[in-house]
Image (spheres, rainbow, N blue to C red):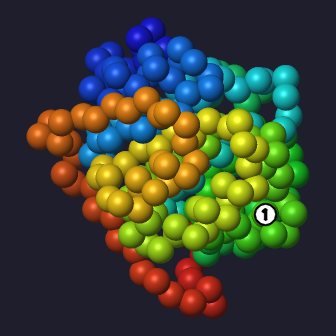
Amino acid sequence: MEVLKTVGFETPTPIQEQAIPILLSDDATDFIGIAQTGTGKTAAFGLPLIEMIDMDNPNTQALIMAPTRELGQQTAQQLVNFTKNNKRLNVEVVYGGAAITNQIKALKKTTQIVVATPGRLLDLIKRKAIDLQHVTYVVLDEADEMLNMGFKEDIDEILSYTREDRSIWLFTATMPPDIRKIVRKYMDAPKEVSINTGEKINKDIVHKYVITKTAHKISA
């Protein structure tokens, strides 16, 4: 687990310890990681993802979908922190409630990893502001939360724009039937790691969201 030490992690969490070796061992692996919020899942998928990126390829190679703007921003910032000594890898985060014109402009630059909320990502796809044909890794982070917020149809449509041979890494706290449907439809013999929910987690994390019309959204 030397990759963890290079970014300041002394002791891996259970999800990191079990997921990272699997994700680093086979770049064609579909993967399911079941663990509670606050258990270090971002590093569990983020560090292997960074290792898989071709720095000489300017195309978007990895897509991370998150349920909320706040989680997307946190994830993107962690990835930036992981790669602060690597100026060749660029990460962009896009989400609703902010000016889409600025996000379109940002995506015109070399961007190997995109972190996005499903609704805004779909809008950008339809505006032809982002091309997913070179994406070889799709991460569904907090997948159960995305479904709870009604993003299943958006996720289905977004995945239809990706190539068939891409790998999907799905991270979730629970496995409701709709998650299993996604697994059956899009994933090929995924490897699965399930962490005991009785482990100590960060109980101070609270997710809140409000369903509202676009005109009423507050910019970040």
Instruction: Say which of 181 and 67 sits in front.
Output: 181
Image coords of residue 63 (percent x, y): 65, 46
Residue under the point 17% across and 42% down = 197
The single residue placed furthest to the top in the displayed view is 2
Residue 60 appears in the rendering: no
Image coords of residue 208 (percent x, y): 35, 71
Label 1 sits on what residue type?
Answer: Ile
Left or right: residue 41 versus residue 94 is left
Residue with the mark numbered 1:
125
Instruction: Say which of 1 and 163 sits in front.
Output: 163
Left or right: residue 129 versus residue 123 is right
Instruction: Say which of 123 and 189 sits in front.
Output: 189
Q: Is residue 72 above or below residue 79?
A: below
Image coords of residue 74 (percent x, y): 49, 49
Left or right: residue 199 versus residue 193 is left
Residue under the point 42% across and 81% down = 210
Residue under the point 61% across and 68% down = 154
